């Protein structure tokens, strides 16, 4: 990956919908050469996809929280993972190290729905303990900005 690829990545991180024509102007290449570089970045796995950023509050789910989950030792976690990701409020989950086994990110309509999600977890699939933290506000920076800084 050369300096031009890094600029292309930075521009796509900033605006994934930019046209090849506009992107080409920014990197001073032809649209065809720019499209070819983007295709190679995709084929190499550096670009894994293009996604829309969704405002969960605008979708009626303004309450975001993190739910830490601890399991009893021993059970197969595959069933739990599959079940958790079918819950409408669960945006994502991560298997983590430390005291907790999983951290879920949820977006709920209100506190009542969050309570339903939290109360449904113990006893299911070996869950023995949970810890819930509300997201008060997100920092102004984003993951995209951090990636742009890494590309330097």
Image (cartoon, rainbow, N blue to C red):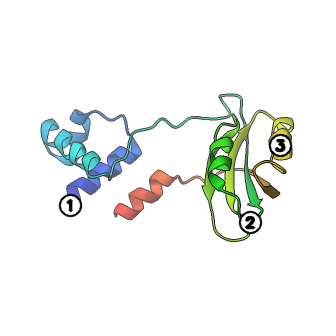
Q: Do labels 1 and 2 touch, CB within 8 Å?
A: no
Q: Residue 122 in the image: x percent, y percent? A: 84, 51
In space, the residues marked 2 and 3 are separated at their CA atoms by: 19 Å
* Secondary structure at numbered mark 1: loop
Q: Nearer the viewer, residue 29 or 71?
A: 71
In space, the residues marked 1 and 2 are separated at their CA atoms by: 47 Å
Q: Which residue is the site of mark 3?
A: 120
Inspect this view and state whether residue 109 appears.
yes
Q: Nearer the viewer, residue 54 or 72?
A: 72
Q: At 39% across and 57% down in the image, what residue appears? A: 148
- Circle 2 or circle 3, nearest the eye: 2
Q: Which residue is the site of mark 1?
A: 2
Q: Nearer the viewer, residue 32 or 104?
A: 104
**Left or right: 30 as drawn, with respect to 141:** left
Q: At 68% across and 56% down in the image, what residue appears? A: 103
Of the 4 image quadrants, the one containing the N terminus is bottom left
Q: Which residue is the site of mark 2?
A: 73
Q: Residue 96 in the image: x percent, y percent? A: 63, 63
**Left or right: 15 as drawn, with respect to 59:** left
């Amino acid at each position: 990956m050369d300096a031009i690829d890094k600029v292309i990545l930075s521009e796509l991180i900033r605006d994934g919908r930019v046209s090849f024509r506009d992107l080409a102007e920014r990197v001073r290449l032809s649209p065809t050469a720019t499209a070819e570089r983007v295709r190679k970045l995709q084929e190499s796995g550096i670009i894994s996809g293009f996604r829309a950023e969704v405002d969960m509050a605008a979708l009626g789910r303004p309450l975001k929280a993190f739910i830490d989950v601890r399991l009893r030792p021993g059970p197969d976690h595959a069933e739990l993972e599959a079940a958790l990701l079918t819950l409408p409020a669960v945006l994502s989950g991560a298997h983590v190290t430390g005291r907790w086994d999983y951290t879920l990110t949820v977006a709920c309509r209100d506190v009542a729905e969050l309570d339903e999600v939290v109360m449904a977890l113990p006893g299911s699939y070996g869950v023995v303990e949970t810890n819930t933290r509300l997201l008060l506000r997100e920092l102004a920076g984003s993951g995209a900005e951090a990636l742009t800084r890494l590309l330097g």
